[in-house]
Amino acid sequence: MAEKMLTYKGKPLVRQGDTIYYGNSEEKYIVKIQINSSKDVGGIKVAEKVTVQLILSDQELKMKDRIVKSSDKVGLYAAMDIGSIWLERALKG
């Protein structure tokens, strides 16, 4: 049985430690979200300060050369919101 991948607005979400990648790595752009700090809310670890980046998916480039846009946000929701907008616009353009 194949595993079902977690998605947001129809695009894959992959978590690696405190980093979340959003988008299809076969497309030109993806979003990288780095959780910089978190807090405990009712016994659940919740992301507090995060950095969201629109990056080129080209693995041949150095990471600093792949960054197209970057912003610091408070909370995962705000990061996912702006990240999905950036990704949608970049893939259309």
Image: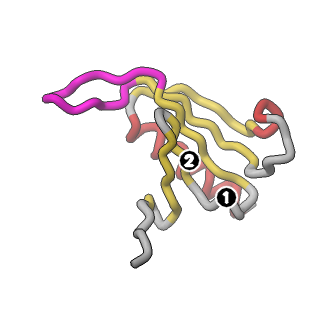
Q: Secondary structure at mark 2?
A: strand
Closer to the camera in the image, 81 or 23: 23
Q: Secondary structure at mark 1?
A: loop
Extreme residue toward the bottom, this view: 1
Q: Where does the image place residue 39, in percent across and percent down from the top left?
A: 29, 22
Residue 61 figure quarter: top right
Q: Where does the image place residue 77, in percent across and percent down from the top left?
A: 38, 41
| Amino acid marked by disc 1 | Ser
Do labels 2 and 1 touch, CB within 8 Å? Answer: yes
The verdict on residue 43 being magenta is yes
Q: Which mark is residue 21?
A: 2
Query: On the image, numbered disc 1 is attached to which residue?
Result: 25
Closer to the camera in the image, 68 or 41: 41
- Quarter the N terminus occupies: bottom left
- Give the crowd class for mark 1: few <14, some 14-19, many >=20 residues within 10 Å: some
- Quarter the C terminus occupies: bottom right
Q: What segment carries the magenta color? A: 36-48
37 is higher (above) or lower (below) than 55 = above
